[in-house]
Image (cartoon, rainbow, N blue to C red):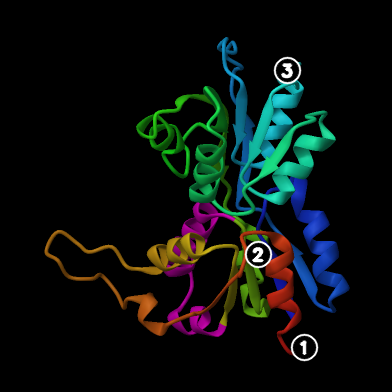
Amino acid sequence: MKVWVTRTANRAHKTAAAVETLGFETVIDPVLKVERLRAPPLSEGFDAIAFTSRSAVEIFAKTYALRNVTAFCVGDATAEAARDHGFSTVLSAAGDAAALFDLIRQHRPQSVIICAPEIPAAPLAQWLTDAGISAHELPLYRTVTITPDTALNAVESIDIILLHSAKAARFIGEMLRTKMSPETVKRLSFIAISKACAEALIAGLNEPETASGEAERENVSEISPNVLISQFPDEASMLMLLSDIPR
């Protein structure tokens, strides 16, 4: 069986190696790339940093020398990256943005810098502000979609697609809807890192309505593609789901 690894290039080969260890073949073809933004100056007077991804940690560490504040991290992989880059006090929410919000709210720092993409997946800064915690966004990068020509050309030989982010999942859903037959989509299986990621895939597979309110073609989501959702929002849980699939 063949698995399409869709995550960004700096992570894809490590994921592919883990997938191949389970006895699957892989196609590596990212659908997103990370572009660094111009680094703004850091605000003063904050006592914590929130990291919403490993990319945020890595870009921050290459840009700023600060390490002596508490680093709140969305998940364990992000927390590991923070420790690797010299943060001594690191706390992991082991979840999603909502879990990260709960973790920060429990510890109640005075002021938090949120290191995130240009367009955050969730309004964490607003949530914290509403909870009475001073929060300021520090946009460090943007993710840009890439058309995965290699994987699309080989899709008839692909069995499973790994979805590591909601943005990638929606983009893949849209491409499958517009470029592939409903029969091809029905045959594929997907492993999503979270419920939000699975919902984004289905949204992408849904046919937008025309101005007259009628679909231009069959609604692919009615085919009910086989989507497995990871128990925890991390790759280890995704691999556990993958390992249970008969080869």
Of the two numbered discs 2 and 1 on the same chain, state the one appearing first in sequence.
2
Task: Please tell me which residue is depicted at 31% across the width and 78% down the height of the picture.
Answer: 218
User: Would residue 218 be found to the left or right of residue 113 on screen?
Assistant: left
| Most frequent secondary structure within the magenta stretch | helix
Residue at point 68% right, 79% down?
157
Res 232 quadrant in image: bottom right
In the image, is 219 to the left or to the right of 48? left
Amino acid, disc 3: Leu
* Discs 1/3, front: 3
Q: Is the residue marked by circle 2 packed among few (<14), some (14-19), or many (20+) residues within 10 Å?
A: some
- Whether 69 is among the magenta residues is no
Residue type, numbered disc 2: Ala
Location of residue 97 in the rendering, given as x and y in whole percent from the top left corner: 51, 47
3D distance between C-alphas at marks 2 and 1: 20 Å
Q: Secondary structure at mark 1?
A: loop
Which residue range is magenta in the image? 165-187
Residue kind at label 1, given as amino acid type? Arg
Could you say whether the residue bearing mark 3 is in a helix, strand or loop?
A: loop
Which numbered disc covers residue 151?
2
Report the residue marked by disc 3: 66
Q: Horizontal and vertical percent for residue 95?
A: 59, 54
Q: Quadrant of the C terminus?
A: bottom right
Q: Residues within 10 Å of mark 3 (few under 14, many from 20)?
A: few
Looking at the rendered image, the disc whose residue lies closer to the viewer, 2 or 3, is 3
Give the x, y percent position of residue 112: 54, 25
Q: From the image, tell me which residue sits under label 1.
A: 247
What residue do we see at 63% from left, 42% from top? 53
Rendered position, 239 above or below 121? below
Picture residue at 39% right of the left edge, 34% below the top: 131
Q: Judge from the rendering whether residue 55 lies leftward or rightward of residue 198; answer left or right.
A: right
Viewer-side residue, 135 vs 65:
135
